[in-house]
Image (cartoon, helix red, strand yellow):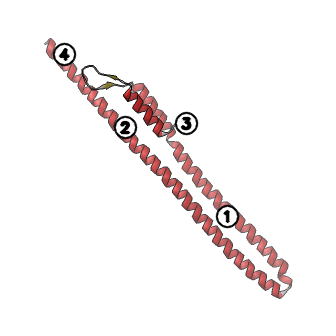
Amino acid sequence: MESIMDYLEMLEELVENSRTVPFSSKISLDREKIFDIINEMRMNIPNEVRQAQRIIEDHDKIIGEAKSKAAAIMKEASMQAHDLADEHEVYKMAMEQAQELMEETKKNAREMRLNSMDYADEILLQTENAVRDALSNLDRFYREIEDEFIQTVNVLYSNRQELRGNKG
């Protein structure tokens, strides 16, 4: 799969290697080749969107794993506290440790969730910026192509008018 920049380079190469229109600075472009490149670009743009979706899924997976680890730690702490319940002093210590462990687990889970959200946001921002840049480049390119076609049509019309004026 090629990147947007590769497609832009292909379009630039097509423009650079195009034949010039006699007696003008205009060029003749192969419409089919241009539309083929544009269609390929359209088909490949959604890959960034799919990448963003995978990032979101990874985010959800990280949060799920953190919750699973927290549940396992809490279950283990609960089992340890139950085992130590026979002796009052040991039971008291176990309850304190379990509470600390639960707080630590909650804190770690919260930090992991926030970190994964920051990471996903950063990747989504990069993807968003890449898509915006590609869209901006496409818009500029489409305007340039449209301007070239309009100029070509105007030259052709002018040439026809000159031919008619010379015959009549």
Assign a secondary structure to mark 3: loop
Whole-percent x and y of residue 138?
40, 40
Q: Tell me how far mark 4 sits from mark 1, CA to CA.
A: 78 Å
Q: Give the Cα separation between the discs numbered 3 and 2.
A: 21 Å
Q: Amino acid at mark 2?
A: Phe
Q: Earlier in the sequence, mark 3 or mark 2?
A: 3
Per the image, the residue denoted by label 2 is 141
Residue that badge 3 annotates? 1
Which residue is pictured at 39% across the width and 44% down the height?
A: 136
- Percent coordinates x, y for residue 101 in the rendering: 71, 75
Mark toward the viewer: 1 or 2: 2
Which residue of the protein is positioned furthest toward the bottom in this rendering? 89
Horizontal relation, residue 134 to residue 145: left or right: right
Instruction: Name the quadrant of the N terminus.
Output: top right
Label 3 Cα neighbours within 10 Å, binned few <14 / some 14-19 / many ≥20: few
Q: Label 4: which residue? A: 163
Residue 125: x %, y % from top left: 48, 54
Residue that badge 1 annotates: 66
Please state, as top left, top right, bottom left or bottom right, where the C terminus lies in the image. top left
